[in-house]
Image: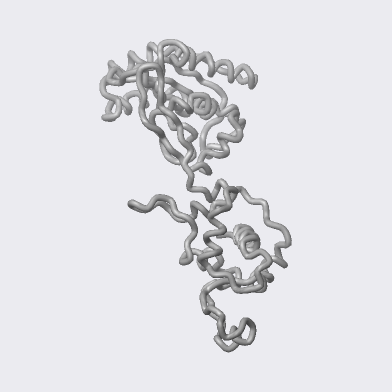
Amino acid sequence: MTPPLQALAVHDISRVIGSDTRRVANAVICDGLAQMDDRPWAQWLPKRTGLGVRALSTKGLPSLLKGSGINPDRVKQRRELNERYGKESNYYRGLTQDDLRPVLERYPNPPKIDLTEYTRVPYHVPITNGTRQGGTITYKLSDIKKFLDDPWPYKIDRLGRSNKEVIYCIASEGWKDGLVKIGYVDNREIVAQRMIDYRSDSVFPGSPIVHWAVECARRPVLEKRLHNLYLPRQWNSVGPGKCGGEMFWGSPKRWSPERMLKAAVNILEETESKYTVLDVHPITYKVRRAA
């Protein structure tokens, strides 16, 4: 929780209370917050077995406001309530506009924050080509938002790396339906070793086949740009925020490795980057001999 997010919550609670001069129950406040489509309150609580993503609850409301000076669990003394509202008043937990005033005075307007950082709605990526159809791969939207907002990221700092990288496209004899992997290494000298490592991995049954490899400057972040282009054809993800993972379904024509290479070259030429398309046959040959 951050003070701006709490301030936004207080402004939203104020909207729910409105002109009501009475104490509004926490349950009513939570129900009102859950009705706001442009806010994360309807999906505030994480998914639990059999329950799914849930809206902010009366138990979660105090935690949301913790540290702000507002306590929705505080029940005023009966005597004070009787004097203000009469003997028929209800002694439930809740809030009034007076309770919210200190925060509203500090933040006269709702702070502008990136609400996708707090959403639990996944981003769905369909997996389908002409011959095969699977389910969906989901992400927390905020994990890949920066890639979705900027489909052509120009700089992503990889600390401790050289200023060059080799982007490669490989497949395996055990893979079907044109499945390929796009990855990168720091330089051409370790490409063959990477292929040896892949061969010893159970994910790559048989010898990995190198379709193409390009050495280029790290500046255009070619790997991530290709991931963005082929995101709808992703098969598997590799950690949060990787923008499409590394493995993609292919097909003989439009989604073939040859088209991927053409797309990579177009990106490099558009960004006026120096590049070299490597001879992959010695790489594949070395791997098979070394194994």
Task: Determine the residue located farthest toward the front in the rendered image.
Answer: 88
**Quarter of image, res 71:** bottom right
Residue 289 appears left or right of 148: left
Percent position of residue 278, x then y: 47, 14
Q: How many marks?
A: 0
Residue at 48%, 65% (x, y): give it: 58
Whether 225 is drawn above or below 20: the answer is above
**Quarter of image, res 279:** top left
Residue at 26%, 20% (x, y): give it: 206
Whether 108 is drawn above or below 269: the answer is below
Task: Determine the residue located farthest toward the bottom in the rendered image.
Answer: 79
Percent position of residue 134, x then y: 36, 28
Colour basis: one colour
Percent position of residue 168, x then y: 44, 21
**Quarter of image, res 156:** top right
Residue 209 appears left or right of 44: left
**Residue 280 in sight in this render:** yes
Residue 142 appears left or right of 256: right
**Residue 164 in sight in this render:** no
Residue at 69%, 65% (x, y): give it: 104
Whether 97 is drawn above or below 80: the answer is above
Q: 53 or 210, which lies in front?
A: 53
Looking at the rendering, in which quadrant would you find the C terminus? top left
Residue at 53%, 43% (x, y): give it: 142
Percent position of residue 99, x then y: 64, 73
Looking at the rendering, in which quadrant would you find the N terminus? bottom right
